[in-house]
Image (spheres, helix red, strand yellow):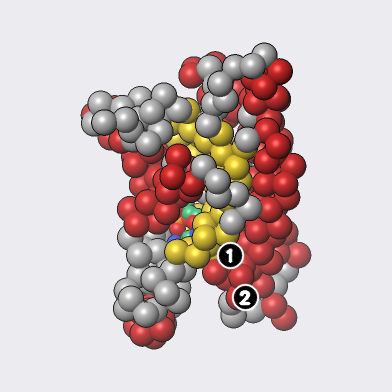
Amino acid sequence: MTLLLENQVAIITGAGRGIGAATAKLFASQGARVVVSDLDLAPAEEVVAAIKDAGGDALAVAGDVTDPAFPENVVKAAMDTYGKLNVLVNNAGYTWDGMLHKMSDKQFMAMLEVHNVAPFRMARAAAPFMRDAAKAERKEGKPPEPRCIVNVSSIAGLNGNTGQVNYSTAKSGVAGMTKTIAKEWGAFGIRCNAVAFGMIETRLTQDQEAGEKISMEGEEVQLGIPGHMKGLINMLIPMGRAGTPDEAAGAILMLASPYASYVTGHILEVTGGL
Ligand SMILES: NC(=O)c1ccc[n+]([C@@H]2O[C@H](COP(=O)([O-])OP(=O)(O)OC[C@H]3O[C@@H](n4cnc5c(N)ncnc54)[C@H](O)[C@@H]3O)[C@@H](O)[C@H]2O)c1
């Protein structure tokens, strides 16, 4: 049986944990060689080890996706190791919640940096190996490689969310970027889609009281949502529960797979109906 991503190379940002880690493992199980990129090296290496134990191939690349030099470094690592690039998943991100009237510029801009500026730089760094490579293939009459970008958004970006004016604004921007890349690169056979997740079980949606933090911009940023809100949110989800990281990864694979070969510029809501 042919695997869905047979012989393809993927870069996944934020792949050390949560949705990105599940996506890296699923992509590898479908034949992709995966660049597992994350802020934190140790979890990225654990994902790579799990992929290798299962018979796959992967490479860990640590770094902050908001560092202007990082996108070119990670793309170079993919090219040096695997020689091509088929799929880019812009997944790295976090939340830094607060009400608008108390939000600092730094807190607002941090969300634009990680959810908008970094994916833009990643796509630009990938352009020579996706857009230009596809153009050259056409000129030479070679069969085209499958190529696509999947950006990770949120229903907060489609509907807004109390306490998340920074995150909602940024995740809304992901939709505009996705549709623009689809228009600019469609002529080269490169698709670009986004997945807007609802509530997926990761450290971003665990009880705030668990105390998980991310060190960013010189600050310890609290992750999670207030525990008492979770029952209420589950009641609002028609399927009555949060999604798992594996279910989230399935939607990303679906968009990257040949079954979505004519789907581009689409924002897929994966929310259990929320
Ligand atoms: N969990 C949800 O319910 C949900 C809903 C909608 C959207 N999302 C989005 O899904 C994506 C993945 O989040 P998750 O829920 O898996 O969270 P997670 O915290 O489990 O995983 C995110 C990973 O991204 C990495 N990361 C964060 N900032 C980074 C940076 N600047 N550079 C490099 N790596 C960085 C983290 O180290 C972490 O390993 C995010 O973009 C998030 O906004 C999540």
When asked about the image quadrant of residue 220, the answer is bottom right
* Residue denoted by label 1: 96
Q: Which mark is residue 234?
A: none
> Badge 1 local density, few (<14 within 10 Å), some, or many (20+)?
many
Give residue 59's position: percent from left, percent from top.
Answer: 43, 26
- On the question of residue 212 being in view, the answer is no
Which one is in front, 268 or 229?
268
The residue drawn where x is 49% and y is 39% is 12
Which of disc 2 and disc 1 is earlier in sequence?
A: 1
Name the residue rendered at 36%, 47% in the picture.
Answer: 22
Picture layout, residue 180 above or below residue 132: below
Q: Position of residue 248 (x, y in %)?
A: 40, 56
Name the quadrant of the C terminus.
Answer: bottom left
Gap in Å between the C-alphas at discs 1 and 2?
15 Å
Q: Is 6 positioned to the left or the right of 64 in the image?
A: left
Give the quadrant of the N terminus: top left
Please determine whether, in this image, residue 175 is positioned above or below residue 165. Answer: above
In the image: residue 95, left or right of residue 125: left
Q: Is residue 201 above or below residue 40?
A: below
Q: Is the C-beta of the residue carrying label 1 under 8 Å from the nearest atom of ligand 1?
A: no
Q: Secondary structure at mark 2?
A: loop
**Label 2: which residue?**
160
The kind of residue on which mark 1 rests is Trp
Question: Image quarter for residue 121?
Answer: top right
Residue 147 percent location from the top left of the image: 56, 34
Q: Please tell me how crowded label 2 is: few (under 14), some (14-19), or many (20+) other residues with Cα within 10 Å.
A: some
Q: Nearer the viewer, residue 266 or 53?
A: 266
